[in-house]
Every structure is written in C-alpha cells, then in structure tokens.
Amino acid sequence: MDKILELKQSVINTLDKNKAQNIISIDLKDKSSMAEYMIIASGTSSRHLQSLSEQVLEKFKNYGIQESKIEGKQSSEWKLVDGIDLIVHIFHPEKRKFYELEKMWSELIPKEKLII
C-alpha cells in the first residue's frame, strides 16, 4: 500500500478510536497542489479537539513527518494538523457547519481555476 494511503487510514482509525465524529476523507489530487488528501472530523469539546489534534500530530511524527504542526492551538473551535501531503481539520460541529469545507472541496474544480 502507498505510504500516504496507509497514513491516511491510520489517521482515520485513530480519530475513530478516539470518538471523533463524522470523519470524511477528500481526495485533493485533481483539486489542489497543497496536499493529496484532506480529512475532516468533528470533536465534542475544546478539550476533545485538542486531544484529537495532538494524537494526529503524534501519528504524523511516527510516520516520519517531523515538520508537521498544529494550527489553531489557541482556538477552542477548530484545529488543523498539517501533515504535508495529508491535512486534517478538526472542528466543533457548529464551526464545521459554518465553513462547509466538505462542500467546497468535494466539488470538481476546472483545471484553469486550479491555483492552490
């Protein structure tokens, strides 16, 4: 199995095991050059968001992605864990609904508009 696919599945399993909700994976290969995949999940509280993001960061480091980091450390409603080829967003459910990243990134983007 491809290393990034293995990591993606490992992150999804970690999120699921630790009670993240509504976990989805979006293939970004034909949509953006910033990453190959995006995972979006919800947590139940600010403490849960922090715990999930730290566990994902640890998973990235275990896979050798040392430059991985958590964005939104001070936020109680959103965290982003940047794993270079795999980006993980963890939201409080209301913020997730507000930003609708699934809708934005699930739509097919014409190649001439593909900038990121």
Image: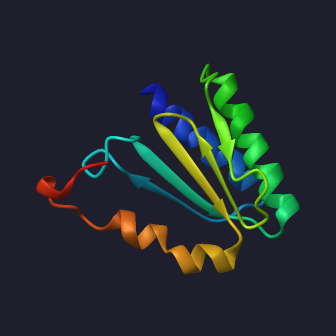
- Which quarter of the picture shows residue 96? bottom right
Q: Nearer the viewer, residue 4 or 34?
A: 34
Counting from the top left corner in percent of width and height, residue 16 is at: 70, 55
Residue at image location 61% in from the left, 19% down from the top: 64
Color style of the picture:
rainbow
Identify the residue shown where x is 52% and y is 74%. 99
Q: Is residue 92 placed above or below 1 in the rendered structure?
A: below
Please determine whether, in this image, residue 23 is positioned above or below residue 13: below
User: Quick one: 100 or 63, which is closer to the camera?
Assistant: 100
Query: Residue at 83% across / 60% down in the picture?
Result: 48
Q: Position of residue 19 (x, y in %)?
A: 77, 60
Placement of the N terminus among the 4 image quadrants: top left
Q: Could you tell me which residue is drawn at 68 percent across and 76 percent down? A: 93
Q: Is residue 77 in sight in this rendering?
A: yes
Which of the two residues, 115 or 92, is positioned nearer the viewer here? 115
Q: Is residue 45 left or right of residue 66?
A: right
Q: Is residue 45 left or right of residue 88?
A: right
Residue pushed farthest right? 47
Q: State which quadrant residue 65 falls in.
A: top right
Specify whether residue 18 is in view.
Answer: no
Residue 78, quarter of picture: bottom right
Q: In the displayed structure, does residue 72 sit left or right of residue 39? A: right
Residue 18, given in percent of the width and then of the height, sits at 79, 53
- The relative height of residue 28 versus residue 63 in the rendered view (above or below) is below
Question: How many numbered marks are there?
Answer: 0
Q: Is residue 2 left or right of residue 115?
A: right
Q: Residue furthest front?
A: 74
